[in-house]
Structures are given as structure tokens and as C-alpha cells.
Amino acid sequence: MAYEEMQATPLSAIAEAFEYLADTIEDGKDELHLIAFCDACALVSVLFNSLGLAFKFAELEYCAKVRGLVEASKIYPTLHNVLDVDVQNGSVKCPGSLSRNLRRVRQGLDLIRALFEQFLTTYDCSLREAASSAYRQTCAPYHSWAVRAAAAAGMYALPSRDQLLTSLKETDESAEFRMKRYIKAVVPVIQYIDKLYLSRNIKLDW
């Protein structure tokens, strides 16, 4: 079935937005514009909201960081510019810096990628199992014990698999199609962001 021809859903909009970003950087000639990146990332907030209270901590942090980058896009055209300014000011890892905001948004995108991968592993996999595994892989290493404990407790409040699909206006089949599109598109975007840090001798262990 040509799901791309069906009525647009939050997942289809997200997949399309990140496919555009991936196409932009595919040949390595074009830089990623901050406003286009922010527009795509803003769409992902719907997914965090659909996960309910369990991911409220992630939604609040993610949305705040995206808003910071949106404001920055009025001054800095590209992601390169954001890193260069903070490197020059020695503020890359400082709380509230744009480079730190970008790093946290990148982790949010990776969390959704891992969640989708776990979700698609088997239809018998509960959302709690998928989300717990995704969180351990992507965000837990960088969070304090208190945040990890709160996240673990919140996993029990996650909606069911069917409830999530209903809230996203998807079926199992259409969700699989669109989640795979997002996974494929977001990986090169994440790699692009990581290279921005590594090329400036900034480690990724924070």
C-alpha cells in the first residue's frame, strides 16, 4: 500500500522532514541550515507527548532545547556557526549554550530512533520494554541517578502499543513503514552532528 499517498500523520510528517535533511547533506556539499533542522526537530515533540508522563522529562528538556535553537536560527544560519561561536567563546559544554542544546536535541532524536527500532523488533514487544531499552542505550549514560530513577518509574505509565498507534493515527503496517523511513533518514543527520563536534576535537561523552 502506498502509505505516502494516504492522509498525512505526525509520523509521516516527521519522516518526510528528516528525509529532506538527509538529502541535503547526502553529497557532503551542503551545510545543514539551523532553521530547517529546528523545523524537523519540532515535529518530534509530538512523539514525546504521545508517550505520556513516562517521557515528560524528555519532552520538557527536548522542547526547551529546540526552542533555544529556534531563537539562535535568527542569528546563526547553520549548525556549523553554532559550534564555531561556542568554541570561540569556550562555552561548548556550559549549561544553556547552543552547542549543549544541540547535543541534547541530538540525543532526543537518537532516543526516538532506538525506540522505533525496538518497537519494530517484534510485535510482542511491549512499549515499556522498547522504551526502557531505548533509554538505556541513548540517554541513561548521560543522566544523573535521580533522572534515571524517575525515568525507570515512569516507564510503567507508558501507553500500550495499540494506544500509541491510535494516538499517532497509525496502524501496525503504516507505523512500521514510516518508522523505518525515520530511522533511515535520521541516522545520517545524527552522524553529521557528531562529526561537527569531533572535527573540532570535542568528545561525545557528555
Image (cartoon, helix red, strand yellow):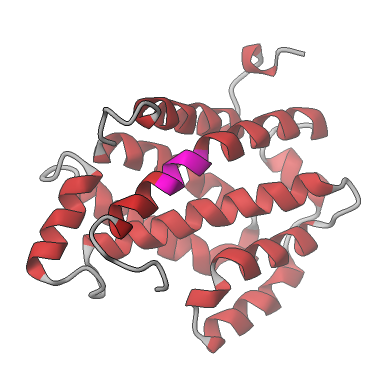
Viewer-proximal residue, 155 or 91? Answer: 91
The N terminus sits in image quarter: top right
Q: Say whether residue 44 is magenta.
A: no
**Label tally:** 0
Residue at (27, 28) in percent of width and height: 29
Viewer-proximal residue, 143 or 32? Answer: 32
Specify whether 11 is left or right of 88.
right
In the image, residue 47 sits, relative to residue 35, either above or below, namely below
Residue 153: x and y in percent read: 69, 79
Specify whether 7 is left or right of 34.
right
Residue 31: x and y in percent read: 25, 34
Give the magenta range. Answer: 186-191
Residue 7: x and y in percent read: 63, 18
Prevailing secondary structure class for the magenta stretch in the rendered image: helix
Residue at (72, 62) in percent of width and height: 158
In the picture, residue 180 is in which quadrant? top right
Viewer-proximal residue, 5 or 102? Answer: 102
In the image, residue 161 sits, relative to residue 130, either above or below, namely above
In the picture, residue 11 is in which quadrant? top right
Q: Say whether residue 187 is magenta.
A: yes
For the view shown, which residue lies furthest in the bottom direction? 145
Residue at (58, 28) in percent of width and height: 12
Determine if residue 53 is in view. Answer: no
Viewer-proximal residue, 130 or 74? Answer: 130
The C terminus sits in image quarter: bottom left
In the image, residue 56 sits, relative to residue 33, either above or below, namely below
Determine if residue 36 is in view. Answer: yes
Residue 107: x and y in percent read: 47, 59
Residue at (69, 42) in percent of width and height: 167
